[in-house]
Image: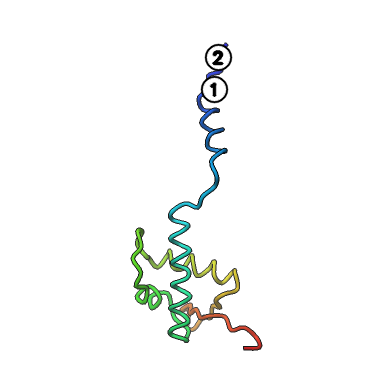
Amino acid sequence: AVCPHAEEDSLLMKRKETPNKPDPRTVENASLKLEILSVLTAYARPMNIDEIVESISGEYTNPVTRGRVSALLTQLKTAGKVERTEVKRIAYFAIKEVDGE
């Protein structure tokens, strides 16, 4: 008897064998994170999301939206690279100062 899922299984096996390379969106987000960090460093003051979005000058395949920048800022905050402060319910982000510098 022929297994009805043999073709699917072989496709899954092929997929597992291919080396994991980052998806284009992941690569683009990594360069966008670097640009966000450089914007925050250049302005050297806390900035809100709208100011950061307006300051981003790179060409990206996918649109640079407030939500996308917010998500990347949250990742950077979790990684300890930026700090978030809130003034009158508006979030501001700045480069996290390293003690001793």
Q: Residue at x 57, y 38 (%)?
A: 16
Sort mark 2 into few (<14), some (14-19) or many (20+) by Cα contacts within 10 Å. few
Which is nearer the eye, 51 or 101? Answer: 101
Q: Amino acid at mark 1?
A: Ala
Vertical order, 36 against 67 (above or below): below
Vertical order, 7 against 64 (above or below): above
Q: Position of residue 11 (x, y in %)?
A: 51, 31
Can you say which quadrant of the picture contains the C terminus?
bottom right
Sort mark 1 into few (<14), some (14-19) or many (20+) by Cα contacts within 10 Å. few
Q: Quadrant of residue 10?
A: top right
Q: Residue at x 37, y 65 (%)?
A: 64
Q: Position of residue 18 (x, y in %)?
A: 53, 41
Q: Which structural element holds mark 2? A: loop
Q: Residue at x 43, y 85 (%)?
A: 43
- Of the numbered discs in the image, which one, if any, rests on residue 2? 2
Residue lying furthest top in this view? Answer: 1
Q: Which structural element holds mark 1? A: helix
Q: Position of residue 15 (x, y in %)?
A: 53, 37
- Of the numbered discs in the image, which one, if any, rests on residue 21? none
Q: Residue at x 36, y 59 (%)?
A: 62
Q: Quadrant of residue 47?
A: bottom left
Q: Position of residue 87 (x, y in %)?
A: 49, 83
Can you say which quadrant of the picture contains the N terminus?
top right
Residue lying furthest bottom in this view? Answer: 101
Give the labeled residue for mark 1. 6
Q: How is the image coloured?
A: rainbow
Q: Amino acid at mark 2?
A: Val
Horizontal side, residue 77 vs residue 54: left or right: right
In the rendered structure, are the residues bearing label 2 and label 1 in contact, judged by CB atoms less than 8 Å apart? yes
